[in-house]
Image: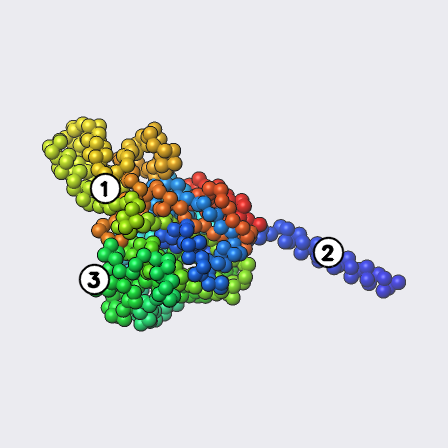
């Protein structure tokens, strides 16, 4: 009898314990230990598949596509398609009309001067003697980011850190309430921050900078990582007058001698794939030193790989250098995921990879193949417009600036002289439409009524902010870019600039792909749903429900 009672009591206790565990699990919201947001600066969507056969089985891209979820028709829904706007949209789920970042630079209509997207003269550099490089903060962003919302949701117990070679690539994703943001200073070769975040770098960061890893990467030079025949199969010729020469006017083709820059010029690293490896080492140092993913709440590391943008601008999408950069980036991403598996745990972290914008082919490359294209220079157009308007209205400087294809009219001068603004604006439009490279000109104040295709009209409306946008939006003909005399650029509505990759991977993510149209604004909404937290305050995106388990 005693044995029966003992067995019964034991079974009852076991069932109670099991029930308690079940209830505890049911009453706890499940979340990943760490979210890693990856932005590859200037990555075209087609690079996922154009170079697919060259990516390694254990590399990052095949892991993302083979085990994650790819949204293959993701687009930027605003103008201009540039770095600052892209990073802001990814992390706010919003557009320039709401979040306020209308370009990398803009002419502020209230301040009546040009403004850089993350400039902040009230803060100081931390980590080097460079002055201007560290006077940066997220204060120009009007809304919260998904990283801010994570901090709010956990009573600021979640750690959030942003890292990039570019200041704007680190600062904006990290948000207003970040624990830290670090960006690269090409003058000192250090990663720096500002007094917005801290008065002094942590000791581990000082030790990281003291290693001067840049010099060790320079020592390797930049050689081709694949056989010559592969580049000849996938790329344009290696020696082209229309490519930039960032390593010296006589450095025409690969391989490049980088040893010459050791201890002298720390900025050249940004135009090489080694900048991605440098950022990988910084990511690992942050994860280890700040114990990311070891908290009882979700942490967030925002990583922006800037090197592909620098390489793309200099050499273009069909260059040997660009191909080499992506093959190496694939390996770098594979190493990052292996590190996360070992330190955080496989299936314990969530990753998304996207781009801030894509990029066009170099116009002269297109011309070789009878494809339309052309060049445009904001500075030259500004001068030409002012010269033309002076002849028409007898007054100089009626145009403040032409930036990001926006024309900023000088309203204070027009008002003070009581000139006819409507006539001036009509003259500008007539002048611009006579240029072969211009497709249309839109009055941004009345863009919603413009007689242009709905897609372009919506992108203009989404990009318009009265305080920071111009009066007129210039719509260029296909292939035309503001890129100086060599290299390439981006910023327009066309798919080659607005079609971006978007892949989710890891905790809570299904395997699969999606062909319906999705948008950059949907990224933070999806992460918010995954984490069961509020979406950012200006978010207009929708959750991509198909990606989640």
In this rendering, would 310 be left or right of 45? left
Q: Residue at x 30, y 36 (%)?
A: 466
What residue does disc 3 label? 249
| Mark closer to the observer (1, 3) | 3
**Residue 392, how many percent across, how many down?**
13, 31
**Residue 48, how many percent across, how many down?**
43, 54
Secondary structure, mark 2, is helix
| Mark closer to the observer (3, 2) | 3
* 329 or 235, nearer to the observer: 235
In this rendering, would 92 be left or right of 118? right
Q: How is the image coloured?
A: rainbow
Disc 2 crowd rating (10 Å Cα; few below 14, some 14-19, many 20+) is: few
**Residue 161, how many percent across, how many down?**
41, 57
Mark 3 or mark 2, earlier in chain: 2
What residue does disc 1 label? 402
In this rendering, would 518 be left or right of 6? left
């Amino acid at each position: 009898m005693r044995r029966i009672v003992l067995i019964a009591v034991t079974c009852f206790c076991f069932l109670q314990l099991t029930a308690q565990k079940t209830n505890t699990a049911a009453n706890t919201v499940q979340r990943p230990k760490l979210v890693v947001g990856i932005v590859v600066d200037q990555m075209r969507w087609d690079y996922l598949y154009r170079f697919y056969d060259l990516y390694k089985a254990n590399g990052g891209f095949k892991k993302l596509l083979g085990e994650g979820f790819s949204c293959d028709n993701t687009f930027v829904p605003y103008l201009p398609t540039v770095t600052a706007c892209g990073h802001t949209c990814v992390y706010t789920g919003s557009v320039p009309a709401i979040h306020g970042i209308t370009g990398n630079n803009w002419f502020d209509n209230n301040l009546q001067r040009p403004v850089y997207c993350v400039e902040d003269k009230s803060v100081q550099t931390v980590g080097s003697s460079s002055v201007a490089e560290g006077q940066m903060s997220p204060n120009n962003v009007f809304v919260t980011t998904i990283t801010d919302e994570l901090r709010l949701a956990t009573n600021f117990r979640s750690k959030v850190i942003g890292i990039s070679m570019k200041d704007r690539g680190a600062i904006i994703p990290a948000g207003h309430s970040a624990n830290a943001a670090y960006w690269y200073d090409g003058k000192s070769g250090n990663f720096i921050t500002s007094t917005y975040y801290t008065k002094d770098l942590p000791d581990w960061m000082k030790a990281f900078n003291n290693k001067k890893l840049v010099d060790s990467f320079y020592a390797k030079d930049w050689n081709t990582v694949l056989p010559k025949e592969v580049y000849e199969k996938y790329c344009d010729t290696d020696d082209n007058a229309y490519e930039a020469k960032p390593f010296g006017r006589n450095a025409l083709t690969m391989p490049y001698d980088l040893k010459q820059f050791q201890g002298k010029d720390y900025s050249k690293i940004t135009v090489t794939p080694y900048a991605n490896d440098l950022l990988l080492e910084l990511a690992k140092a942050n994860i280890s030193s700040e114990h990311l993913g070891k908290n009882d709440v979700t942490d967030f590391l925002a990583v922006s790989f800037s090197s592909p943008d620098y390489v793309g601008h200099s050499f273009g999408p069909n260059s040997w250098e660009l191909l080499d950069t992506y093959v190496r980036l694939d390996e770098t991403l594979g190493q990052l995921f292996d590190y996360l598996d070992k330190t955080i745990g496989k299936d314990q972290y969530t990753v998304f990879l996207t781009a801030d914008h894509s990029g066009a082919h170099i116009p002269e490359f297109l011309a070789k193949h009878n494809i339309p294209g052309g060049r445009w220079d904001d500075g030259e157009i500004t001068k030409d417009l002012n010269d033309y308007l002076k002849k028409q209205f007898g007054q100089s400087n009626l145009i403040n600036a032409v930036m990001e294809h926006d024309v900023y009219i000088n309203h204070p001068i027009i008002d003070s002289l009581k000139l006819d603004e409507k006539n001036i604006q009509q003259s500008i439009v007539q002048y611009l439409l006579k240029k072969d490279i211009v497709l249309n000109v839109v009055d941004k104040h009345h863009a919603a009524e413009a007689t242009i295709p709905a897609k372009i009209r919506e992108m203009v409306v989404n990009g318009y902010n009265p305080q920071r946008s111009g009066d007129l939006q210039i719509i260029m003909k296909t292939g035309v870019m503001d890129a100086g005399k060599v290299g390439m650029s981006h910023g327009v509505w066309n798919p080659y600039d607005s079609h971006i990759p978007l892949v989710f991977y890891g905790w809570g993510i299904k395997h699969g792909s999606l062909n319906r149209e999705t948008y950059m604004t949907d990224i933070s909404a999806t992460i918010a749903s995954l984490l069961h937290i509020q979406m950012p305050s200006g978010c207009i995106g929708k959750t991509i429900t198909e990606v989640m388990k």
